[in-house]
Amino acid sequence: MDALNAKIRVQNTLSLDPKWQDFNVPLKRNTNIVERPANQTTLTKRYTEEAVQFIKDHQKRPFFLYFAETFPHVPLFASPEFKGRSARGLYGDAVEEVDWSVGQVLAALAQYNLETNTLVFFTSDNGPWLTCKWNGGSAGLLRDGKGGTWEGGYRVPAIARWPGRIKPGQVTGELASAMDLFNTCLLLGGVAIPKDRPIDGVDLSPVLFGTGAGLRTNQFYYYGDQLFAVRQGAFKAHFQTRSGYSKDAPAQHNPPLLFRIPNDPSEQFSVTNQAGVVAAITKTADEHRKSVEPGKPQY
Amino acid sequence: MDALNAKIRVQNTLSLDPKWQDFNVPLKRNTNIVERPANQTTLTKRYTEEAVQFIKDHQKRPFFLYFAETFPHVPLFASPEFKGRSARGLYGDAVEEVDWSVGQVLAALAQYNLETNTLVFFTSDNGPWLTCKWNGGSAGLLRDGKGGTWEGGYRVPAIARWPGRIKPGQVTGELASAMDLFNTCLLLGGVAIPKDRPIDGVDLSPVLFGTGAGLRTNQFYYYGDQLFAVRQGAFKAHFQTRSGYSKDAPAQHNPPLLFRIPNDPSEQFSVTNQAGVVAAITKTADEHRKSVEPGKPQY
């Protein structure tokens, strides 16, 4: 938690118009530092050029491109072409540059005739950093933000695109986790899922291609190494709650606070008289806890 | 306020699955009661049939159709064809039936070749009724709900459609008010705005047709006959605040609580060090108060 608190202090002092020279962060290619401090105003553009080049170089064979944009994580930067362009301030500028970047990747897929055999999956880091105010992002209608187990700290948007395979313009209420991309990509690439260890993901294919019900039935919400909440089907039970990065001790809930998420995604109206649901989720939580072998913290 | 409190009591006792027989409301044609209690499960369908017939009857000459759907206002009802259809419960069912209804109106415009000379403007009643929990609706990312002057109590969605005149798929951050529809429709119909009285609306044409900046520069937020807040450009100043239909006395703010709405539509992060903005909005509020002649309450 000391590292976490230090991180919060850093974020609290972040300027709304940061200078990249003030952040002594390295830019690496593989294990070599190529620039330090990295000129962060150029990152989106340089990453995008690399991604487009990668697609060009690998157009003749199957490839997996993991393109992790730096922004709109704080500290925020945008290139001169994008800075000051949006009504939403620097955050909006960074989002518009990421939008441009995604457009470049999609254009490269079209250019090399890869659209109909490429799954593009766009998703996000979780939770607005509320201490950075509006430059920390927004969870929209979801409650709270980063560092907590309310939906605003966990749930992220995701868009999947595969012309000819995925029906466009559909919205699903099925559960999915970033962990499921591992299973989904392996199976789509014809690779078997390893059997020598527990795998937490499921194959998203039924949801993506509309071939059946989603395979994910629950979601576990952790704060550090503590299981705070469990989603199962429509319901989410909070056994403990705490606002993102609050210094207060978590509130304990017995029976758990229960919400029906499809009806109440903002977790405003807790539900009672659902003893059967509470019992089922509590059992899932207990079984999950027993199944987890704590690892050594890497943080 | 007594009538208001009575209304709140009624809403608090509303069932999540109401019976239309329990609401002794009249259905009128002009001034005549044609059914009492009205079978509210049939209203969306019957209103829609009337609207489509009206369009058919008036297809050869200019017309103005004001189609006020009853739902998804509480108490909620949906026809048997829509009840139980959505994952969002009865509220979602009612929304899906309204969506069907709008589709019927648009289909009628297409059928009679009226699409390219008809402005369709779709908007909503304001503010979710928080006491009705998830059946009272949702303000999405906006703060609070009906009966208050936070954005969740005032701001509503609006969609304008006019093929060939309005560019599709655009989103505007310009201010607009339902009061502006009066000016806009009169001017589009070639009718002069009355000059014998103050008119609070402005012409929305520049915003709709992309021909210039919006003409609305501010918005006044009332609770009863009290001016609680003023939006001017990007900023909104709250002189008083109170959660929707709270029984607590309003909180007084001097200087006013200030938010920058395009950056912070959820009114989470108040802004300070903006003395010039506060002075300008306070002047607007004072001038507005002086310009208003209180009428006799009609409630």
Image (tube, coloured by chain):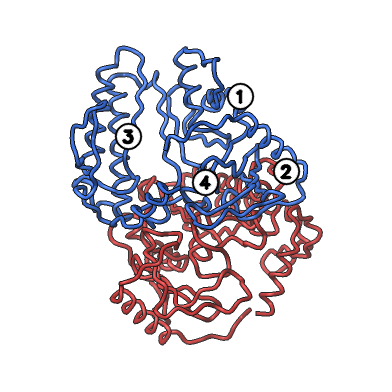
Chain colours: A blue, B red
Depicted A228 relative to depicted A209: above or below: below
Amino acid on which the number 2 mark rests in the picture: Val
Residue A59 pos. (x, y %): 29, 16
Pointer 2 indicates a residue of which chain? A
Q: Which residue is mark 4?
A: B106
Is B207 displayed left or right of A264 in the figure? Answer: left
State the residue in front, B291 or A182: A182
Residue identified by numbered label 2: A278
Q: How far is the residue under mark 2 from the one under mark 3?
A: 42 Å
Q: Amino acid at mark 3?
A: Val
> How far across and down, in percent of the image, does residue B21 sit?
81, 58
Decide which of tag 2 and tag 1 comes sooner along the chain: 1
Q: Amino acid at mark 4?
A: Leu
Disc 1 residue type (three-letter) = Gly
Is disc 1 placed on a helix, strand or loop? loop
Provide the residue designation for mark 1: A212
Q: Are marks 4 and 3 on the same chain?
A: no
Residue A102's disc is 3
Mark nearer the N terminus (2 vs 3): 3
Horizontal and vertical percent position of residue B35: 77, 61
Label number found at residue B85: none
Q: Residue at x 60, y 26 (%)?
A: A215
Q: Nearer the viewer, residue A297 or A188?
A: A297
Residue A118 relative to residue A179: left or right: left
Q: Nearer the viewer, mark 2 or mark 3?
A: 2
Are the residues flagged by discs 2 and 1 in contact, CB closer than 8 Å? Answer: no
Query: Residue B118: where, in percent of width, then height?
Result: 44, 52
